[in-house]
Image (spheres, coloured by chain):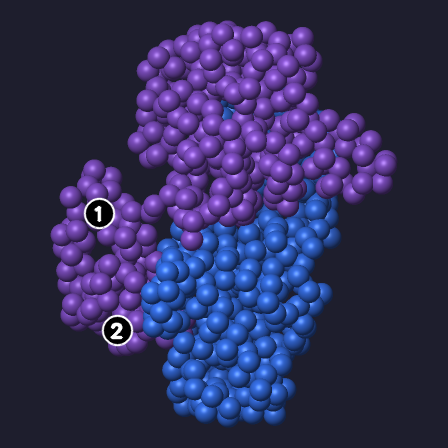
Chain colours: A purple, B blue
Amino acid sequence: MPIRRRKSRKIFVGRVPVGGDAPVSVQSMTDTPTRDPESTLAQIERLAALGCDIIRAAVDNERDIAGLKTICAASPVPVVADIQFDASAAVGAIEAGAAAVRLNPGLVRDARQLRPVAEAAKAHGIPIRVGVNSGSVGTEAVKKKMAQGMPHDDALVSALVEAALRQCDQLEKTGVSAIKVALKSSSVPVTAAAYREFARRTDYPLHLGVTEAGTRKRGVIKSACGIGALLLEGIGDTLRVSLTAPPEEEILTGLAILESCGLREAAPEIVSCPTCGRTEIDLPGLADRVEKLVQEIKNSGKRINLRRIAVMGCPVNGPGEAKDADLGIAGSRSGEQVLLFRAGKVLGAYPANAGFEVFRQELLKSCE
Amino acid sequence: MPIRRRKSRKIFVGRVPVGGDAPVSVQSMTDTPTRDPESTLAQIERLAALGCDIIRAAVDNERDIAGLKTICAASPVPVVADIQFDASAAVGAIEAGAAAVRLNPGLVRDARQLRPVAEAAKAHGIPIRVGVNSGSVGTEAVKKKMAQGMPHDDALVSALVEAALRQCDQLEKTGVSAIKVALKSSSVPVTAAAYREFARRTDYPLHLGVTEAGTRKRGVIKSACGIGALLLEGIGDTLRVSLTAPPEEEILTGLAILESCGLREAAPEIVSCPTCGRTEIDLPGLADRVEKLVQEIKNSGKRINLRRIAVMGCPVNGPGEAKDADLGIAGSRSGEQVLLFRAGKVLGAYPANAGFEVFRQELLKSCE
């Protein structure tokens, strides 16, 4: 079911297109000190191997800028400098080779601070990300709107959108039009409303995310709800899943969200039915085993030429439910056997362990 | 940001209202054999304690019906009988005390099979769930639409919606109007499109879910994308997250999706910032520790009177970003200290372990 994507202007972060007809890219942020290029580059390489398209690194001072220079020269993916308080660090980061800079309009508001950054970005032909978030958008602006009778969340949405529009406008006035925008809140409904409103009013490419999404489990669910809902509406050109967890998990979650929304092919997709009282085998164990096997094969550099693998617990429903699958494994009624099927046809019934080995062989036959 | 929910007719599954202005309820399905009431009831009690509102159990034969009778008599939450192949098992389940039955229109299509079930449901005043899914909707119907030039996914959406409408119509003709409907596919965009279309055309309450969502990690992400997107659009009256994992995880994920969408209060909400190069402390470790502490307090039966707890890595941004939090903990620049803050004001700086203990005490002060 192809999603009708919002038409946004296309910009380039290094060689990675963002917006227009470009695929939705996945980003993360290094959690190593930027002043330490060696550990930061090692992390970037691990993330790039997992599928990270663009990486961001915090740049606060001269030592970070020096580190960034080394990182940009060797990074396999474009590096975005994350600027919070010191706009002058942005100029240094651009000169050090950053593929883009992220500014926070809640912290860098003054046109006099912004101008040198805009000039440097223009001179180096790089885009600027306007990254608003609910934590740093002015409380005054929110309070003022609330005093006019606006409910808190509406006031916050309006303040997020206005802060982003204002900075985009400031940048356009200095001749910068390669802009992408994020409007993140830790509330999913506020985040969704802010992106929708901004999407309606501009053609800037949008960087999706829910900020301070939280601990591993919760953060994944909040991000999938918010980012997934926007993507399914056709909104979003690049994304970062923010987790209080290693950046590797942010990349894997981001890729899984894109695959879930049909915006990236999962090769292969693994479907597995929930457990119920009809299941006589250890279905979660079997499904985890299949997922691990697929990941191992992929990590070994092989490509699996299957569109869909099914792991089914219900011996009767199994082949029927999995008729769309290229390769499937289902438990038998007694729990002692597994049934294998390929393209909807039963291959045979086997004792559990032997069956898994046959499954593995069938899977390897489909690799190149 | 309150969601404007679709107006659906209200039905009752036992004492639990579904549809209308009722809160969105969370369901799961037992994975114990229904013929074994003891283990099934033990599981239902664990699930109910976690927040499960409605439970479903597979009913295929006489032994299941006998088990169901004992289960229904003692269950703390309403029990729905899941019927797949044998419509006559539905009549037995209704007589055994089921609070609702789920029928699969892909498997029970014949009006002659349906009529006795409808009559029994009417006589006992219970609703019927029409539960279509992509695995059992007729391939013929899909192929026919494709032969007329419809792309596969559109044909599938159309077939899901038509199969559900047809069975609702059959039921209405026998005088049954207490109906809820599910239209699940293992594809998130197909699922979303099918629910949207059906929601537009009827006022039946909707049971949301993505079927065969998959292994733990993937399944959570797919379900959050699909269910979250629909909920944020105002669609959905009850939900089940289908995971190839124990039903406890389905309930916790379902509740977290509702909380993420602002449809259920998280008490307290824990926000935590992602890690980045500015973080000098083990933020994932700290966030997990805080989450565990909160869960332990909740499990002990205490109520935490805080709306929001913040766990921040960035020593500079910490209190600023978390100004909305009632209680917060943030790492210091050196990584050796933590800062505590309450309602946006700094309480003090402490060595890491001592600081966590002060945090724990502050949290306990807010409990009753």
Circle 1 crowding by C-alpha within 10 Å: few under 14, some 14–19, many from 20: some
Name the mark on residue B117. none
Q: Secondary structure at mark 2?
A: loop
> What residue do we see at 55% from left, 52% from top?
B229
Task: Give the label on residue A332, or none.
Answer: 2
Query: Can residue B325 be seen here?
Result: yes
**Residue at coordinates 37% horizontally, 11% vertically from top-left?**
A70
**Foreground residue among B263 and B322:** B263
- Up/down of B174 relative to B130, above or below: below
Check if mark 2 and mark 1 are on a common chain: yes
- Residue B166: x and y in percent read 50, 78
* Name of the residue lying farthest toward the front: B148
* Between A283 and B367, the one nearer to me in the picture: A283
In the rendered view, would you say B366 is above or below B347? below
- Look at 44% across and 17% down and name the residue there: A99
| Residue drawn at the location 52% of the way across and 20% of the way down | A178
Label 2 marks which chain's residue?
Answer: A
What residue would you read off at disc 1? Answer: A304
Query: Percent from the top left, x then y, of residue A239?
Result: 48, 35
**Quadrant position of residue A130:** top right
Please name the amino acid that badge 1 sits on: Ile
Q: Chain of mark 1?
A: A
Q: Is residue B263 left or right of residue B198?
A: right
Residue A163: x and y in percent read 68, 26
Mark 1 lies on a secondary structure that is loop
Marks 2 and 1, how far apart in space? Answer: 26 Å
Q: Label 2 sits on what residue type?
A: Ser
